[in-house]
Amino acid sequence: SQKDVAVFSRQFATMINAGLSLIRALHILEEQTENEKLRETARGVRTDVERGASLAQALGRHPKVFSRLYVAMVKAGEAGGVLDSVLLNLAATIEKQVELKRKIKSAMTYPVAVFAIVIIIVTAMLLFVVPMFEELYSELGGQLPLPTRLLLAVSGFVGKFAPFIIVAEVLAAWGLRRWVATDKGRAVWDSLKLRIPVFGKLIHKTAITRFCRTLSVLLRSGVPVLESLEITSETVGNSVVATAVKDT
């Protein structure tokens, strides 16, 4: 997780600042890291450094653990002789990103929970409550209002085709996920997210916050402006904002 990488970076910075060599520091991290995946990664990085690769090159061979932002900052830190400071900045940046994600999830938990409860209640009413009224109305006779007849029709349709509706929803969710994974689908989906009432502004502000924070850290670490903008466009989390950054 990002928290593991943040702790890894902070411990790495402390040992570098204390005067330990890269290989010795990586060996200690390999022994102390509790996360199995990160331990294997540290072992691979140490092996590559022992074979003559730079730290940035060794980290770049593990893109699933260390992002391009991470590798670029480490490369700048190695070139400027301030690797310990850069690693501390990375740890702080990752921790802020984790905290930002936590705040976003916390802000969206309540409305999402309310929406889920409403869906469950409406589904239960259509499947169980409305059919009871249908039997009562049929016994009383007479012509029902159009809205009531429509509600009864929807209830009957849902009750009769419930399994097919569930399968269709699962297939639709799977298809949407596959479509969003494409470049065109991602662009359309991200554009729609920015137009959602209330949530659109939250998503937009989150992307801008990531842009400002990431660009600030990269420039402060000595990464060239053009490379910083290119890396930042990959970390904002929204393809619309990323395109705007690339056009800059």
Image (cartoon, helix red, strand yellow):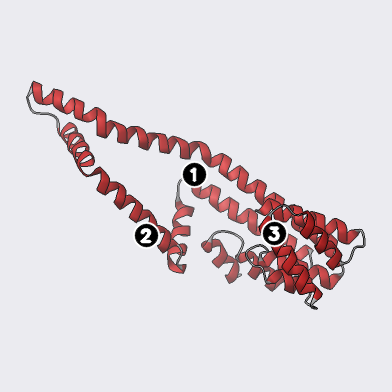
Secondary structure under the numbered disc 2 in the rendered image: helix
Q: Is residue 119 left or right of residue 127?
A: right
Identify residue for label 2.
175
- Residue 140 at x, y = what percent? 9, 21
In the displayed structure, 205 sits above or below 225; it is above
First in residue order: circle 3 vs circle 1: 3
- Quadrant of residue 64 in the image? bottom right
- Residue at the spot 44% in from the left edge and 59% down from the top edge: 189
- Residue 24 at x, y = what percent? 86, 64
Q: Amino acid at mark 1?
A: Val
Viewer-proximal residue among 83 and 206: 83
Q: Amino acid at mark 2?
A: Gly
Q: Bin the neighbour count of mark 1 within 10 Å (Cα to Cα): few under 14, some 14-19, many 20 and up.
A: few
- Residue at the spot 49% in from the left edge and 44% down from the top edge: 198
Identify residue for label 3.
38
What distance separates the C-alpha of mark 2 from that of mark 1?
26 Å
First in residue order: circle 2 vs circle 1: 2
First in residue order: circle 2 vs circle 3: 3
Identify residue for label 1.
198
What distance separates the C-alpha of mark 2 from that of mark 3?
33 Å
Viewer-proximal residue among 35 and 193: 35
Mark yes or no: residue 72 visible: no
Q: Amino acid at mark 3?
A: Leu
